[in-house]
Image: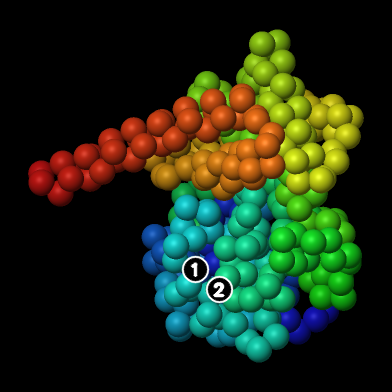
Amino acid sequence: MSHRNYAIVGTGALGGFYGARLQKAGFEVHFLLRSDYDRVKKHGLIIESPEGDFTLPQVRAYRDANKMLKCDVVILALKTTQNHCLPKVLPPLLKDNSVVLVLQNGLDTEPEVAKIVGDDRVIGGLCFLCSYKVSPGHICHLDYGTITLGEYARDYQPTGITNRMHQIARDFKHAGIPIKMSEDLLLSRWKKLVWNIPYNALSVILDARTDELMANPDTLALVEEIMAEVIAGAKSCDRIISNDFIETMLERTHKMKPYRTSMKIDYDESRPLEVDAILGNPLRIAQKAGIQLPQISVLYRMLKFMDAQKQEAERTRRLLTVDS
């Protein structure tokens, strides 16, 4: 086993799950938290999983990045809506040869991180994971868990498989985390959007789980149509995704346990939605290339409205709570 140490920036349903698996396997892991800090510092992390429940009674928990050790691999698992914090959070965690593994949804997240830490430090990671946070420090893993790794280069030029990807992959595999490796990060990002855009958007707008969207013939047809638009968006970036990939995604979702998407959970919990990372950025990139994605455009505008309304209601609730 390697002696690489890991920092988890964003100890939620995704970062908490993967970080806990790494610590359980014997790796040194440091967790950055905000609202969950007190609970996790005192009681550790609890993981429920079909692969085996476990508890880590003690973890290295911090609420201030400046007090953390510098780490070999910094796993960025924050929601993209929190990326305004990164210029303060990331630099204190980096050694001279550290890398930042970006486990975030959507498109164009790596360039944002690269502006802070440099292109050569960034690796992209795409997670196919069904998990949610039950309560502070308590994570329930429902299904899947594979991470696809891909090196980032400026303008998403394909870089092939690198030695440091192999090194990180070995650590994750040792922790029981399935790993795939991609020679073309941009293609992999678009492939994930084939699933993420329809299911995240429709789950919020229609107030539905994945199984409910699959069971209704009208919503199933809509999912397929939106997936086809995502493939058209990928083509605008000279990335070709076969139409057979749609059937693959539908089959996986049919087999998936009933699931509230991450965007639906955020909406239900009155948290800001990752609308721009998941829908807005792909939409703008395709439009810049002269490709229109009309259904995704409608979904984007609806979600922007719903998100704004929800956030305004949350601000009002907080003001009333303070006044009372």
Mark 2: few/some/many CA within 10 Å (<14, 14-19, 20+):
some
Residue appearing at x 55%, y 67% in the figure: 9
The quarter of the image holding the C terminus is: top left
Report x, y in % for residue 191: 77, 42
Q: Is residue 91 above or below residue 287?
A: below
Q: Quick one: 235 or 273, which is closer to the camera?
A: 235
Given the image, on which type of amino acid does mark 2 rest? Ile
Q: Quick one: 161 or 255, which is closer to the camera?
A: 161
Report x, y in % for residue 185: 78, 56
Given the image, on which type of amino acid does mark 1 rest? Leu
Residue appearing at x 79%, y 39% in the figure: 235
Residue 93 figure quarter:
bottom right
- The kind of secondary structure element at disc 1 is helix
- The kind of secondary structure element at disc 2 is helix
Q: Quick one: 47 or 242, which is closer to the camera?
A: 242
Report x, y in % for residue 237: 76, 46
Label number found at residue 86: 1
Furthest residue toward bottom: 96
Furthest residue toward left: 324
Mark 1: few/some/many CA within 10 Å (<14, 14-19, 20+):
some
Q: CA distance from mark 1 to mark 2?
A: 8 Å
